């Protein structure tokens, strides 16, 4: 593709241990159970794309929505994404030997078209470096992807390294609307001094940052709520969107959202059958989640999910938190955040 030929040499290299650890379950984690065939279960809709699209559209139409806004979808240079998929294919010890099929292993154009068929009005390109020297290159690719993909919220990324403030500012000036940070894959402390100017810049610009900082599916050296609490103490107005509801430290991250009014959470993979088997959300905390209904955003992890897209939606619906909560989570909160 033309944008690959124009890109500078790929600094990504192979998927390093830090990246693998970020994708892994700990070896001792229970394995997700097999699909049951019950309504809302893992195998509920492994059907044709058209049938899946009909199911997703039926969901948001029942809620009276104009579509969905998904703040956690992955698009990145194809060769980088294929390396991620290759790791999942190994079912090796770093994912506890779990079989994790990629439900939407398709070409870039087909994946974007499928989200459009689902009625996803806006989505992100969650891309991230697993080592220094990658972020600026990824951001260059993301500019082109956003230009040729009108429904994509222009996404950028960062890493603690010399020059990070400069290339974050360049990304903001190029029109980035959301950033992705992956503490687990990058194996860095989000409170690193190198990142402080970048966090300050993003807080001032009011640009949200979707950050994978919880210790799921496997803990990293700097995962968990404590490093994020240190970031927020210095940048209380930073618009952090905690990915995966912060699993498995759900309650601790709920606490940060209750303390800081700019902290939000995304639902990525939470409440699905796959995740509930090894990192279940504590049901006694559901009232707190309901109370943060204006700051919870739909995320899916598309395309890297081992179940149909609709399963995430049904998993949220079966929480029985009400249609108003569902409408806010699946569309209105993100639409307000991004001015859609």
Image (cartoon, grey):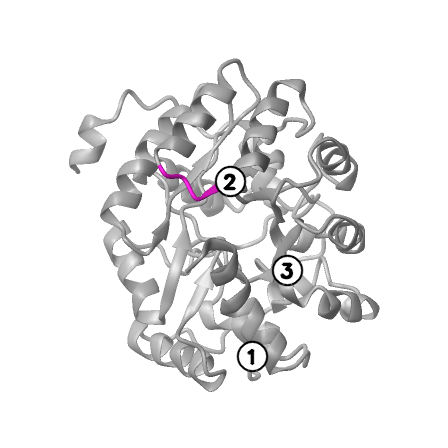
Q: Which residue position holds label 1?
A: 40
Dot 2 alpha-carbon crowd within 10 angstroms: few under 14, some 14 to 19, many 20 or more: many
Q: Earlier in the sequence, mark 3 or mark 2?
A: 2
Q: Nearer the viewer, mark 3 or mark 1?
A: 3
Q: Which residues are magenta?
A: 175-179
| Quarter that holds the N terminus | top left
Dot 1 alpha-carbon crowd within 10 angstroms: few under 14, some 14 to 19, many 20 or more: many
Q: CA distance from mark 3 to mark 1?
A: 25 Å
Residue farthest front in this picture: 204
Q: Inspect this view and state whether residue 122 appears.
A: yes
- Check whether the beta carbons of the residues at disc 3 and disc 2 lie within 8 A of each other: no
Q: Residue at position x 73%, y 30% from top?
A: 234
Q: Main secondary structure of the magenta part?
A: loop
Q: Which residue position holds label 3?
A: 295
User: Relative to the observer, which residue lies in front, 39 or 188?
Assistant: 188
Residue 176 part of the magenta segment: yes
Secondary structure under tag 2 reads strand
Left or right for 242, reference 89: right
Q: CA distance from mark 3 to mark 2?
A: 18 Å
Q: Which residue position holds label 2?
A: 180
Residue 17 sits in which quadrant? top right
Q: Earlier in the sequence, mark 3 or mark 1?
A: 1
Q: Residue at position x 31%, y 72% from top?
A: 49
Left or right for 231, reference 99: right
Query: Is residue 285 positioned above or below 169 on the image?
Result: below
Q: Residue at position x 29%, y 42% from top?
A: 145
Q: Residue at position x 59%, y 69% from top?
A: 34
Residue 212 part of the magenta segment: no
Percent of width and height locating residue 174: 34, 33
Secondary structure under tag 1 reads loop
Q: Nearer the viewer, mark 3 or mark 2?
A: 3
């Amino acid at each position: 593709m033309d944008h690959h030929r124009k890109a500078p040499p790929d600094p990504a290299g192979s998927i390093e241990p830090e990246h693998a650890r970020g994708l892994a379950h700990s070896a001792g984690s229970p394995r997700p159970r097999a699909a049951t065939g019950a309504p809302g279960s893992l195998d509920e809709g492994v059907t044709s794309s058209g049938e899946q699209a009909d199911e997703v559209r039926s969901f948001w139409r029942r809620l009276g929505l104009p579509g969905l806004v998904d703040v956690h979808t992955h698009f990145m240079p194809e060769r980088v994404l294929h390396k991620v998929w290759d790791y999942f294919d190994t079912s090796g010890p770093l994912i506890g030997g779990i079989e994790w099929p990629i439900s939407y292993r398709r070409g870039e154009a087909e994946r974007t078209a499928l989200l459009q068929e689902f009625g996803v009005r806006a989505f992100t390109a969650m891309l991230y470096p697993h080592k220094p020297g990658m972020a600026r290159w990824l951001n260059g690719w993301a500019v082109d992807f956003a230009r040729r993909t009108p429904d994509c919220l222009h996404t950028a990324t960062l890493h603690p390294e010399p020059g990070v403030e400069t290339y974050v500012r360049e990304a903001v000036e190029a029109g980035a609307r959301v950033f992705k940070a992956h503490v687990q894959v990058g194996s860095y402390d989000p409170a690193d001094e190198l990142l402080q100017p970048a966090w300050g810049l993003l807080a001032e610009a009011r640009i949200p940052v979707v950050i994978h900082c919880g210790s799921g599916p496997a803990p990293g050296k700097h995962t968990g709520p404590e490093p994020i609490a240190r970031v927020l103490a210095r940048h209380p107005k930073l618009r952090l969107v905690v990915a995966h509801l912060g699993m498995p430290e759900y309650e601790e991250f709920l606490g940060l959202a209750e303390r800081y009014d700019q902290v939000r959470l995304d639902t990525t993979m939470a409440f699905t059958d796959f995740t509930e088997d090894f990192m279940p959300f504590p049901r006694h905390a559901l009232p707190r989640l309901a109370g943060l209904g204006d700051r919870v955003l739909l995320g899916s992890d598309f395309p890297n999910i081992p179940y149909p897209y609709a399963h995430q939606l049904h998993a949220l619906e079966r929480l029985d938190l009400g249609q108003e909560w569902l409408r806010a989570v699946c569309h209105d909160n993100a639409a307000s955040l991004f001015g859609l």
